[in-house]
Amino acid sequence: MTTYPLRRLRLRLGDEHREGVTVALQPFELGGERYLPVPAEAEAVFEAQRAVSGDVFRLTFGSRLHGPCMRCLQDAAVGVEIDAREYHATADDSPQDLRSEYVVGGELLLSQWARDSIATALPEQILCRRDCSGLCPVCGKDLNEEPHGHEETVADPRWAALEPLRDAS
């Protein structure tokens, strides 16, 4: 896990610090499937700026997640560009909602911040391609490779009592 020691920053009001950092990226688990960032480390730009009542942090980097497609389970990859910002009030009596959860014991938890930023930048579904047809709900075959249909669907016997109502309408 990558952390940044905030004690190293010697900023006065209005000063800004900028440097390149290597951030270790953690794997994701979404819907029971594992997605890996490739490469496992990202070259990021970290910026810190001293404001009147606290510090403003910025982290920018690009990453790519690899894992199964959410429709057909084939390999899928999605690229994300991250431009994350955090504010951390420095006064001891400042409200909790003005304090960054990524600042712990004088260190900025860059890996956790990067992971959460990637999670919020992901699309709703990670797909192998936009028009992925997914798996057949009857036989489980990949509809991208073998488009097909099933002529007769077997009705669930538990719904048999409702069949006369369908015919009545």
Image (spheres, rainbow, N blue to C red):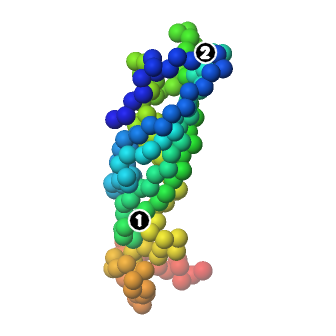
Asked if marks 1 and 2 touch (Cβ < 8 Å), the reply is: no
Instruction: Name, please, the residue furthest toward the bottom.
Output: 151
The image's mark for residue 37 is: none
User: Can see residue 120?
Assistant: no
Q: Quadrant of the N terminus?
A: top left
Instruction: Name, please, the residue furthest toward the top.
Output: 93
Query: Of the residues under marks 1 and 2, which one precedes in the sequence?
Result: 2
Q: What secondary structure is marked by label 2? A: loop
Count of marks overlaid on the render: 2
What crowding class fits label 1: few (fewer than 14 Cα within 10 Å), some (14-19), or many (20 or more)?
some
> What distance separates the C-alpha of mark 1 from that of mark 2?
46 Å
Residue 71 picture location, percent across and down? 42, 68
Residue 120 picture location, percent across and down? 52, 46
Residue 102 picture location, percent across and down? 46, 28
Q: What secondary structure is marked by label 1? A: strand
Question: Going 54% across and 42% down the picture, which residue do you hit?
Answer: 60
Q: In which quarter of the image is the C terminus?
A: bottom right
User: Can see residue 113?
Assistant: yes
Question: Going 35% across and 49% down the picture, which residue do you hit?
Answer: 40
Q: What residue type is labelled 1?
A: Ala
Tell me if residue 32 comes above or below residue 169 in the rendering: above
Q: Which amino acid does label 2 sit on?
A: Arg
Question: Going 38% across and 59% down the picture, which residue do you hit?
Answer: 66
Residue 152 picture location, percent across and down? 40, 88
Relative placement, left or right, of 133 versus 66 is: right
What crowding class fits label 2: few (fewer than 14 Cα within 10 Å), some (14-19), or many (20 or more)?
few
